[in-house]
Amino acid sequence: MKLLEGKVALITGGSRGIGEAIALKFAAEGAHIAFTYVSSDERAKALEEKLSAMGVQAKGYKSDAGDYAAAETLVNEIMTQFGTIDICVNNAGISKDNLLMRMTPEQWDDVLQANLKSIYNLSKQVIKPMMKNRKGSIINMSSIVGMKGNAGQSSYAASKAGIIGFTKSIAQELGSRNVRVNAIAPGFIETDMTHYLKDGGAEKWFEKIPMARFGKPGEVADVALFLASDMSSYVSGQVISVCGAMNT
Ligand code: NAP
């Protein structure tokens, strides 16, 4: 028996990086996959085909997670096409790094909207079927930067810290309905988002990481699988770091 046999998972930001790894891992465990993206049409199509070939129902939706009305439309469409939603991974995110003295109001707003308002938007919609079904797992992608802070990343850190407070609060609101809510806090993971860090050599970053390497998207997906499955049936309101001991 696979860990997510027949479950329906919504994964925001599934076209690349960590989201794509989660989609593939969940599908391999038998979940049907609805995922979102904003611009990567070709990558989304290719992923949709790859997931379908794994024998599960799969569809990519071009939908901005930061837009409340779009989130409502998205969840209605998924409910029509998939019948329910058992798991929601709020993974979509961006960074627009700058020192505070140079950060524009637009840069601040863009990051908060894509990273934090998105979590409100999607969670507000998916809890309807989950509360009705008396089961569900919401997994929010935070970051160790939300716990430690990082110079040049005040907007990103604020959004990721906000995710932790949101996660702990709604875990308390939804516990009696058997809807679990947890966050994952990755460290440096090898994706497009961190690609620029390798300019000038990745080794200088390894000095900050006790395990002396970046993580792989699949290593975050393994933790997401644990939180999505019944293996974590009494785990809610928690933040699990996946960071090679960078945040202890
Ligand atoms: P990535 O490679 O840059 O991929 C981002 C994904 O999010 C893409 O699929 C992108 O779609 C999608 N996306 C961006 N804005 C969106 C929006 N408004 N609505 C819907 N989809 C949107 O990023 P990643 O490194 O995999 O990061 C995934 C999550 O993990 C993010 O929340 C990030 O903050 C968090 N995280 C990453 C790291 C790391 O080291 N990589 C560390 C800590 C936390 P398109 O392809 O269409 O652009």
Image (spheres, rainbow, N blue to C red):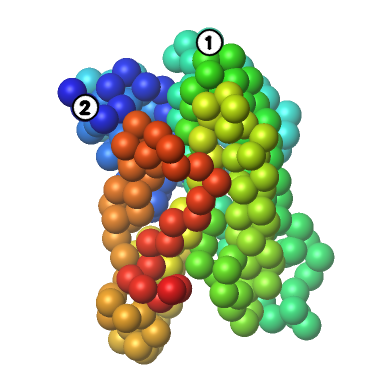
Crowding at label 1, few (<14), some or many (≥20) Cα neighbours within 10 Å? few
Question: Between residues 39 and 206, which one lies in front from this camera angle?
Answer: 206
12 vs 163, left or right, is left
Q: Secondary structure at mark 1?
A: helix
Task: Report the amino acid beneath label 2.
Answer: Lys
Residue 199: assigned label: none
Q: Identify the residue at image location x=41%, y=23%.
A: 8
- Assign the C terminus to one quadrant of the image: bottom left
Residue 2: assigned label: 2
Q: Identify the residue at image location x=53%, y=19%.
A: 134
Residue 72, by quadrant, is top right
Task: Report the amino acid beneath label 1.
Answer: Thr
**Residue labelled with disc 1:** 80
Dot in front, 2 or 1: 2
Where 150 falls versus 60 (above or below)? below
Crowding at label 2, few (<14), some or many (≥20) Cα neighbours within 10 Å? few
